[in-house]
Amino acid sequence: MHSMTEVFKTTDQVVEIGDLWIGRLKAAASASPLRRSRVCLHLASTDNIQEMILALCSDVLFKPHRHLNKTESFHIIEGELDVVVFTESGETLRVVQMGPIGSGKTFCYRLNASLYHALLPRTPFVVFHETTEGPFLIDTAQYAPWAPEDRAELRAFLEESISRRGRVHRIRA
């Protein structure tokens, strides 16, 4: 595998991710201006299935966005994050509090609709497995027009959206 700043890619036919990779991703995220890193498990950006292990620092913020005709799922490996799902107009539809198996929180999430959503890391690092549909096309996310641009305002907006919703939904098995 080789590195391009905070993105690691592979040409390996068999890909293994263990503790060393998690440490490498966390170190790369800490050193990155974006405060995140990833290792791609798929071979090419044109692959139909895109799988990655991501590490985010707690200060990473994602503006609410949506993907048209694309699903995504997360499986938490380490740390905790909140996923905030919004209506078209910016009301909080759902808050998914995520953590690893054994944390009592949701450890696996999938978004099956083109809904606006944002991530808010809750621990110094969060590491998770993401699966989404390919091919990867840059700049295809649609950003919510009602979300603040300023980082401090965006964090306050997300925190307020979470506290306003007040409850967590889980699929009961």
Image (cartoon, rainbow, N blue to C red):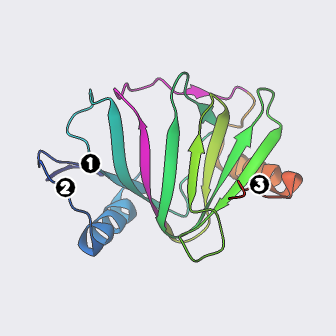
Residues at badges 1 and 2 in contact (C-beta under 8 Å)? yes
Report the front residue among 150 and 64. 64
Residue at image location 63% in from the left, 62% down from the top = 106
Q: Which region is colored magenta?
A: 126-145
Location of the C terminus by quadrant is bottom right
Q: Earlier in the sequence, mark 1 or mark 2?
A: 2
Residues at badges 3 and 2 in contact (C-beta under 8 Å)? no
What residue is disc 2 on? 15
Q: Which numbered disc covers residue 4?
A: none
Report the front residue among 110 and 44. 110
Residue 62 visible in the current orientation? no
> In the structure shown, which secondary structural element does the residue marked by tag 1 occupy?
loop
Q: Quote the CA–CA distance across marks 1 and 2.
A: 7 Å
Residue 74 picture location, percent across and down: 50, 51
> In the structure shown, which secondary structural element does the residue marked by tag 2 occupy?
loop
Q: Which numbered disc covers residue 41?
A: 1
Report the front residue among 30 and 67. 67
Position of 135 with respect to 10 (left or right) is right
Q: Which numbered disc covers residue 169?
A: 3
Would you say residue 110 sits in the magenta stretch? no
Position of 129 with respect to 82 (left or right) is left
Q: Nearer the viewer, mark 1 or mark 3?
A: 3
